[in-house]
Amino acid sequence: MYHLDVYGTLVAATLVLLLGRKLVKSVPFLEKYTIPEPVAGGLLVAFSLLVIKQVFDWSLSFDLSLQEPMMLAFFATIGLNANLASLKAGGKALFIFVFVVVGLLLVQNTVGIALAKLLGLDPLMGLLAGSITLSGGHGTGAAWGKIFTDSYGFQSATEVAMACATFGLVLGGLIGGPVARFLIRNIPTPSTADDDKDVPTAFEKPQSGRMISSMVLIETLAMIAICLMAGSYIEELLASTAFALPKFVCVLFIGVILSNGLSLLGFYRVFDRAVSIMGNVSLSLFLAMALMSLKLWELASLAIPMLVILGVQACVMAAYAIFVTFRVMGKNYDAAILAAGHCGFGLGATPTAIANMQAVTDRFGPSHLAFLVVPMVGAFFIDIANALVIKLYLMLPVFPTLVG
């Protein structure tokens, strides 16, 4: 076995990101379904290391001491970018959609746990193949995977989480468009000529903001550091109580309080674009480290049962979007676009949801409501709601007790 120290691991992670960028731009399938660059590069490296181990019985280990700080920094940026004042713009539709999304979290976890028990698997596997990775994505999956390994003794939790999240990402991009097309076959669609009737959102027509300077990045870095420090402190305070939460959830909450508190006092307004850049860098490095260090040989016994659970989850997502999301949100064109977006982040990630909606609206006409509601729910509300739902499920008697 060869071991890379922290600097070697950081170099390897950056090379994985560059490899992933090249792969996504070179392979049409990866680009079409918006597979993230760290996922593409990281999985290729993980599969390569699997082959090397099987053929030459040689393995490579990494110093992952930077992995947790990168993960926490990402969730801090989610909280910092949560502008509660913008909730007014979403109106009633935003809050209704939040309840629809929470309903899916409950359905996904119930289906996942039931199938895991039916297949004779650890019920934690059902949660990993449920809302943790499907509605949560790679970042949330890796965060809970570490918790399941450290606190519940599920040794291959991170490997399972990454596999489930990647599979869901592909399926989320595959079913969103067909679901929307099925729903709008008998309802009127807007004319593309009406595209400029309302002010479009940044996701529809991104516009440049003020320039990012070194001082802005330092200010952003300072706020992220405050979130990590305060979140870690709160997590320790709550650890022995009934209100114990994962550290990344505490960090996210501190981000929300810090960002909106400073804005309310008129002291400082968070620069969203700088926070997003820092968050993307943190998430990319975190995912690269998590994926390139996967021990895929530990997944062999779980491969077929995992695919069975994920296949059922994809069918459940499509049915939920058609019979619940579409109907509850008004059974109109906007509801159909929201259903397509829900398929995207209900199985994959918010970027997949945006890609699904863009593909449909480019052909059938704009939906400003969908592009306002989905990003806010998919990028912020889903993480908080998901964490609370998972915490509630872990209290069920079917789950093992904490290790140690």
Image (tube, rainbow, N blue to C red):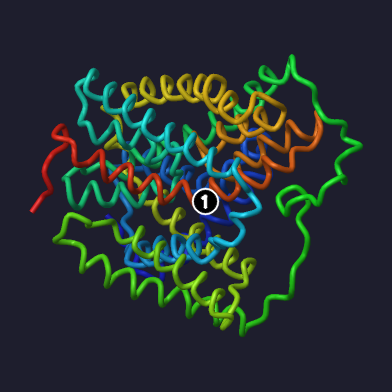
| Left or right of residue 101, residue 237 in this image | left
Q: Quadrant of residue 94?
A: top right
At x 68% / y 76%, what residue is drawn? 212
Between residue 128 and residue 57, name the one nearer to us: 128
Above or below residue 35? Residue 69 is below
| Left or right of residue 78, residue 21 in this image | right
Between residue 349 and residue 240, name the one nearer to us: 240
| Left or right of residue 384, residue 272 in this image | right
Residue 257 image point, x, y percent: 44, 69
Above or below residue 309? Residue 367 is below
Q: Quadrant of residue 47?
A: top left
| Left or right of residue 212, residue 290 in this image | left
Residue 290 image point, x, y percent: 39, 52
Point out the residue furthest to the left here.
404
At x 38% / y 28%, what residue is drawn? 107
At x 50% / y 64%, what residue is drawn? 77
Q: Looking at numbered disc 1 in the image, what kind of residue is underneath it?
A: Pro
Element carrying mark 1: helix
Mark 1 is surrounded, within 10 Å at the Cα level, by few (under 14), some (14 to 19) or many (20 or more) other residues, namely many
Q: Quadrant of the C terminus?
A: bottom left
Residue that mark 1 sits on: 38
Above or below residue 370? Residue 73 is below
Report the number of numbered marks. 1
Residue 296 image point, x, y percent: 34, 39
At x 29% / y 31%, what residue is drawn? 126
